[in-house]
Image: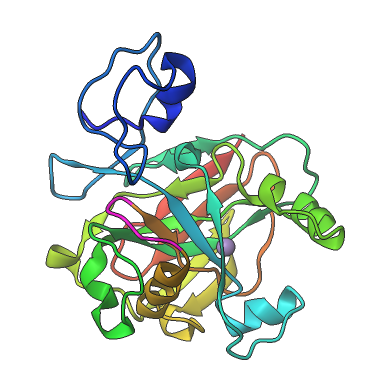
Amino acid sequence: MQRRNLLSKVGAAGLGSFALSAQNSYATNSVKTPFEVPSTYIPIKGSAEFFPVRRIYCIGRNYSAHAIEMGSDPTREPPFFFQKPTDSVQYVAEGQTGNHPYPSLTKNYHHEIELVAALHKGGKNIPVELALNNVYGYAIGLDMTRRDLQRGMGDQKKPWEIGKSFDHSAPIGSIHRVEDYGHFTKGAIWLKINGATKQESNLSSMIWSVAEQISQLSAAFELMPGDLIYSGTPENVGPVVVGDLMEGHIDGLPSIRLKVV
Ligand code: MN
């Protein structure tokens, strides 16, 4: 756990007190800081190592029936992406039920069950046919959404940030390595609330595959090891309230369970 995100330390320590790389603000050497800032790590299934999270990218409207319910054209428009903060990750261990705090400000809090790809390599302008080489593993995740705030901001042509990028908005299970579990390109994906199925589809129904997402994302951002990609949710997103038990499933991965508190 030596790697530190120096972006968080620049403001406190002051630029000039240590050398930053010419290309970015990361370094792996230790620096003195006046306080500690936690980093984000996710357990890796079958390993004593942890996956270090750099950035969280999410793709919007990536299953056609969900695109329709969100009011957009389900044809292959270019995919669009947004980010969540790294520390919005809420890890939930296999077989456990995480307590998920109902967030502030919203009266319409939605579940979005998603496959998450975890990268161990990156680059710019990655060709689709090479893109899956960058995937270290996969996890089950939820892109929790303050839908009323997302829609309200969208209606005003303002950024979605407050609807998507809040504390605890990215629940996730452990990372399952490609070398052990392969790539997840098809298989059931569903979400139940209090035992009743709400979302149900198949990974093969994605409009843009994980490989295509990586390729397109890498045209806009240089992807790096540690990046997560939430690959979009199927149709029938809907609200949860305090007391609800969410159970998410993707074939080949352990279920994720969260109680809204
Ligand atoms: Mn989503």
Left or right of residue 237, residue 98 in this image: left
Quadrant in the picture for residue 183: bottom left
Residue at the extreme bottom: 75
Does any portion of residue 243 appear in the rendered image?
A: yes
Q: Nearer the viewer, residue 161 or 110?
A: 161
- In the rendered image, the vertical position of residue 222 relative to residue 46, given as above or below: below
Quarter of the displayed picture in which ligand 1 can be seen? bottom right
Total numbered badges shown on the rendered structure: 0
- In the rendered image, the vertical position of residue 239 relative to residue 220, given as above or below: above
Q: Nearer the viewer, residue 134 or 257?
A: 134
Q: Residue at x 53, y 48 (%)?
A: 84
Q: Residue at x 67, y 48 (%)?
A: 161
- In the rendered image, the vertical position of residue 216 relative to residue 105, given as above or below: below
Q: What's the magenta bit mostly, secondary-structure-wise?
A: loop
Q: Position of residue 62 (x, y in %)?
A: 55, 76
Left or right of residue 237, residue 94 in this image: left
Q: Is residue 190 magenta?
A: no
Q: Residue at x 86, y 61 (%)?
A: 155
**Magenta stretch in the rendered image:** 221-226
Q: Position of residue 68 (x, y in %)?
A: 71, 82
- In the rendered image, the vertical position of residue 24 relative to residue 1, given as above or below: below
- Quarter of the image with the C terminus in it: top right
Left or right of residue 189, residue 159 in this image: right
